[in-house]
Amino acid sequence: MWRVRDHATEHEQGHEIQESKRALDGPIDDTIYRRDHSKRIELINWVLEQMKNPDTPAREVIENKMNEIIDKINQTDSIIEADPLHSELRILDWILYEVCSNEIKKL
């Protein structure tokens, strides 16, 4: 079990939040893309908040959230309803990769 209180990870995720905010402030040409940026900011902030607790294994918390989303997708009959959940799952997968790869670099 690893616990993350990694300032490099926090810094990188903070940079990603700024990039997403910059994209949100740009021209309004694709609402799905904008929705993904909003969700990306929300999820990065959620992960960073979870990482503040040194007793919380960030990997497990992210994986649990991903499993909840997968369960919601499996209960959904509509592709339209499932699409935002798939986007959220992809974002969390990317965040999980970033958090784990930074932890591996520290080893």
Image (cartoon, rainbow, N blue to C red):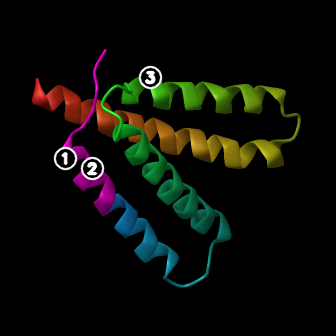
Q: Position of residue 107 (x, y in %)?
A: 11, 23
Q: Position of residue 40 (x, y in %)?
A: 50, 55
Left or right: 87, with 1 as reference point = right
Main secondary-structure element of the magenta-colored stretch: helix
Between the residue at mark 1 and the residue at mark 3, the CA separation in whole angstroms equals: 19 Å
The residue located at (58%, 68%) in the rendering is 34
| Residue sitting at the far left | 107
The magenta segment is 1-15
Residue 5 occupies quadrant: top left
Between the residue at mark 2 and the residue at mark 1, the CA separation in whole angstroms equals: 5 Å
The residue located at (76%, 42%) in the rendering is 82
Asked if the stretch drawn in magenta spans residue 7, the answer is yes
Which residue in the structure is indicated by mark 2? Answer: 10
The answer to whether residue 20 is above or below residue 50 is below
| Residue sitting at the far right | 77
Which residue in the structure is indicated by mark 3? Answer: 60
